[in-house]
Image: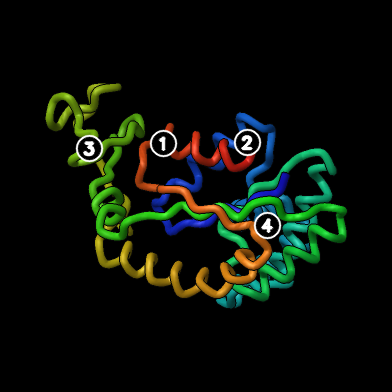
Amino acid sequence: MNIILLGPPGAGKGTQAQRLVDRHGMRQLSTGDMLRGAIKAGTPVGLEAKAVMERGELVSDAIVSALIGDELDAMGPDTGAIFDGYPRTAAQADSLDELLAARGRKLDHVIELEVDEDALVERIVGRFTCATCGKGYHDRFDPPKVEGTCDKCGGHEFKRRPDDNEETVRTRMAEYRAKTAPILPGYEARGLVARVDGMADIEAVSAAIEAIVAP
């Protein structure tokens, strides 16, 4: 089974991908993780990507395709793939079809986690973690039981990601819509697209995805 998970940053793709990995033994293929792994391992594609990045340039579609091809070959034919953060453009969508077909695979589902932009901004901007143990909290939805004290380790220092601010989140949402809008019609014409309410709680989102992939 080969699945594309779509959704803006903060929609919960990473959480749901991990649940699919745990339930079905699939592999999550995140282009960012693959790129870092290939560079660290010093593979031919990794070395090429490193040289491009050191020049301050964006990694090309050809390099990303080569990375994905290498990962698919390493996985073996019986392991399903979850594509996270790829494809982002119509050209990448065509490339993915070719990569899968060359390995006797096909795309089974394109699942989009739909979100309410204002609610997502609140979800992301309110996030913070304990600086000592890393436990996550939220200003409104999940504050520490005792204000200023971590429930888990008793620490008193907390931190927030610098990009967890409203302006950045709305910019990322706009980028997602602009980049993803062109690839959806092609997948919809093939009957591959299913949409899930990404604002529901984690268990409900998991159940909705499970109903799509294993009806």
The label shown at residue 215 is 2
Q: Amino acid at mark 1?
A: Ile
- The residue carrying pointer 2 sits among few (fewer than 14), some (14 to 19) or many (20 or more) residues within 10 Å by Cα, namely few
Q: Identify the residue shown where x is 25% and y is 62%.
A: 166
Q: Nearer the viewer, residue 80 or 69?
A: 80
Q: Is label 3 in contact with label 4 (beta carbons under 8 Å)?
A: no
Q: Identify the residue shown where x is 56% and y is 58%.
A: 85
The label shown at residue 202 is 1
Mark closer to the chain start, 3 or 1: 3
Is any part of residue 46 visible from this angle?
Answer: yes
Q: How many marks?
A: 4
The label shown at residue 39 is 4
Closest to the camera, between mark 4 and mark 1, is 1
Mark closer to the chain start, 4 or 2: 4
- The residue carrying pointer 4 sits among few (fewer than 14), some (14 to 19) or many (20 or more) residues within 10 Å by Cα, namely some
- Residue with the mark numbered 3: 141
Gap in Å between the C-alphas at discs 4 and 1?
33 Å
Q: Is label 4 in contact with label 2 (beta carbons under 8 Å)?
A: no
Q: Nearer the viewer, residue 50 or 187?
A: 187
Q: Is residue 66 left or right of residue 180?
A: right
Q: Identify the residue shown where x is 42% and y is 56%.
A: 9
- The residue carrying pointer 3 sits among few (fewer than 14), some (14 to 19) or many (20 or more) residues within 10 Å by Cα, namely few
